[in-house]
Amino acid sequence: MAVVVAVAAVVAGRALWSTIVPAGLPRPAVDVDATFGAAAVAEAESFEAFLRVLSIAGIVATVVTLGLYAWRGARFARESAAGPVGTGFLLGMLGLAILWLVELPFSVVELWWLKRHDVTDVGYLEAIGMQVAALGGTFLAICLALLVAMGLARLLGAAWWLPAAAVFVGIMAGLTFASPYLVPGQERPPRWAQREVDRLARAEGLDRTVPLRVEEVSEFTSAPNAYATGLGSSQRVVLWDTLADGFPRDQVRVVLGHEVAHLARRHLPKSIGWFAVTIVPTALAIAFVTRRRGGMGEAAAVPVALFAFVVCGLLATPLDNALSRRYEAEADWTALQATRDPRAMEGLFVGFTRRGLSDPDPPGWWHVLFDSHPSGRERVQMARAWAQLHGGASGDTRAP
C-alpha cells in the first residue's frame, strides 16, 4: 500500500508542479541598489536579518521543546482517568500550551522589532491577547485532528493513516471554502477597482465575477499585502487598505491581476492537492513512530505524534516553498500578460521594499529553505524579461 501511495504522490506532484511560465526566460541584469535604492535595500536587509535569526532560534526552541515532550510527556497519561481519547486531548493541549509559553518570548521580541521599524502599531498586551484567542482556535484544531487520528486508529488499527489523511484533506478543503467568511473588517472596494477585477478576470480566462474586498488593517500595520481566498463560489480577492490607498492605480492593477491569476490558474485547489501529497506520508510517518507507544490509538503516543508532525512539516518546508514560489511566479506572469504593464510591476516591487521592508535579494540558503515568494530582484527580472520578449522597455523605476 505504501508503495502505491508513494507512486501516486510522485505522479500528482509532477502534475501540480507544472506552470505556464515559459522555460528559458531571459535573465536581464538587475542592479539591486540602483533599482530599489541603496538606503532602502540596506534598511530591508538589516530588518529581515534580525528576523531570520529570531526565526531560526524559534524553530530550534520548538523542536527541542517538542522533542523533550515526546520523551517525557507520556508519563502524564498515567495520571489521567479520562480514557484514551480524552487523555490524548489533554496531552495534545498540554503540549500546545507548553509550546506557546516557549514561543511567547520570541513573539514579544519580534513585535518589539516590528514596532521599532514602524511596521505595526499593535501593543504588547493586545498582541498577547490576540495570540491567546488564536490559541483557543488551535486547541480546537488539535482536538479535531486527534479525534480523527485516534478514533480511526482504535477502529482500524495500524491502517488508520490513509483514511485519516483523506479526512484531513476534506477538512482543509472545507476551511479553504469558509476562509473568506472568517476574516472581519472587509469593505467593498472603489468601483474602479471592481471594474478592473472584472476586466482582468475576463482577460485571464475566468467566466465569472470575482468579488473584491478591502481589508481594514492600517490601524495595526503599514505593511502592504493582498491575497486570493476561498474555493468555488466563495472565492474572492482581498486588498489590504495599506496597499489599496497607498500605491498608484497602475500598481494596484498589477496586484489585482496577480491575485485574480491565483484563481484563474486554480492555485487554491492545487494547494489542497499538494496538501494531500504531503499529509499522506506525514500520517504514515506518525503511524510508524508511534508504534512503540502502542499506536496512535493510545494517549501515550500523542506527544510523539506532535513531535513527528512538526519535524515532517519542517522537512517538507523547502519543497512546499519551492512550489509556492512557482505559483507566485505564474501569477506574476499571468498578470503581465493581462495588464501588459511591466513598468508598473517593477514599480510595485520597488515599493514593497521601500514601504514593507522586504529584502529584495535575501541570502540564497534562506530563499531556498524559507521564502514562499520569489525575491523582489527575481520579480523585477521577470518584468524586464517580459518587456524584452515583447519588444519594449520596462521603464525606469530606479531610485533617485
Image (cartoon, rainbow, N blue to C red):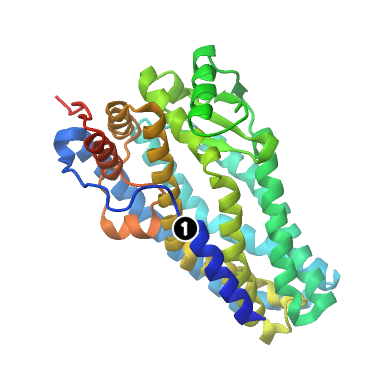
Residue 354 at what x, y percent from top left? 28, 31
Residue 237 figure quarter: top right
Q: Is residue 216 above or below residue 307?
A: above
Q: Is residue 205 above or below residue 71?
A: above
Residue 191 at what x, y percent from top left? 54, 12
Identified at 71% across, 53% down, the residue is 171
Q: Is residue 172 above or below residue 82?
A: above
Mark 1: give few (<14), some (14-19) or many (20+) Cα within 10 Å.
some
Locate the C terminus by quadrant.
Answer: top left
Most extreme residue toward the top is: 191
Residue 119 at what x, y percent from top left? 39, 32
Locate the N terminus by quadrant.
Answer: bottom right
The residue singled out by tag 1 in the image is 17
> How many numbered marks appear?
1
Q: Nearer the viewer, residue 13 or 288?
A: 13
Identified at 44% across, 51% down, the residue is 19
Residue 211 at what x, y percent from top left? 61, 26
Q: Is residue 42 left or right of residue 83?
A: left
Identified at 57% across, 55% down, the residue is 100
Dot 1: element: helix
Identified at 31% across, 26% down, the residue is 344
Dot 1 amino acid type: Trp
Q: Nearer the viewer, residue 307 or 394?
A: 394
Q: Nearer the viewer, residue 157 or 204?
A: 204
Is residue 385 visible to the viewer in this orientation of the structure?
yes
Most extreme residue toward the bottom is: 292
Is residue 136 visible to the viewer in this orientation of the structure?
no
Residue 277 figure quarter: bottom right
